[in-house]
Amino acid sequence: MTDPVGRCEREHRLQAVIANGYGKYPNKILFMTHAILVAAGDGRRAGRPLKKQFVPIAGKPVFIHALMAFETSARIDTIVCVIAKSDRPYFEDLIRQYPISKIKGIVDGGAHRQDSVLSGVSFLEQRFAA
């Protein structure tokens, strides 16, 4: 069961990071397009033995299709991947098999999706703050 008060607080923190980041670092953040791939879910609702981000479609895991779309887009400058800590070795092994050079960070996901998104945004804020 979700905690509505905690969720509101997390969403407010996320909005504050986005607002503060754009205000403080306009030269670095506003003129680049960053993609955050949030793939930290556990896939319980999918009812599969394999997490849905790793399910193959046309011979490639779902998340690889998303990464390749970002990689080949002229509008995307950087990619940050947010994954479950326990999936990191498997994830890193898979991405080495594909020509993806725009990944600038792999960060651990949180307990809830909004926590994972906040991790990705916070990484970008720290990375491009100077």
Image (cartoon, grey):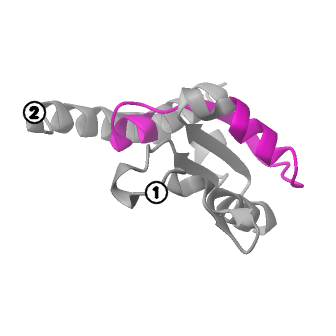
Q: What residue type is labelled 1?
A: Arg
The span from disc 2 to disc 1 (Cα, nearest Å) is 31 Å
Q: In which quarter of the image is residue 98?
A: bottom right
Number of marks present in the image shown: 2
Q: Give the range drawn in magenta.
A: 89-118
Residue sitting at x 60%, y 44%: 29
> In the image, what residue type sits under mark 2?
Val
**How many neighbours does mark 1 have within 10 angstroms: few (below 14), some (14-19), or many (20 or more)?**
few
Q: Quadrant of the C terminus?
A: top right
Q: Is residue 42 shown left or right of residue 73?
A: left
Image location (x, y in percent) of residue 121: 50, 38
Which residue is disc 2 drawn over?
A: 5
Q: Which of 77 and 108 is in front in this view?
A: 108
Q: Residue at x 24, y 37 (%)?
A: 12
Name the residue tied to disc 1: 48
Could you say where residue 36 lies in the image, as x and y percent from the top left? 57, 49
Q: Position of residue 55 (x, y in %)?
A: 60, 60
**58 or 122: nearer the viewer:** 58
Numbered disc 1: secondary structure = loop
* Horizontal side, residue 20 vs residue 34: left or right: left
Question: Seen in the image, is 122 located left or right of residue 80?
Answer: left
Q: Where does the N terminus fall, quadrant-wise?
A: top left
Q: Which quadrant would residue 129 be assigned to in this image?
A: top right
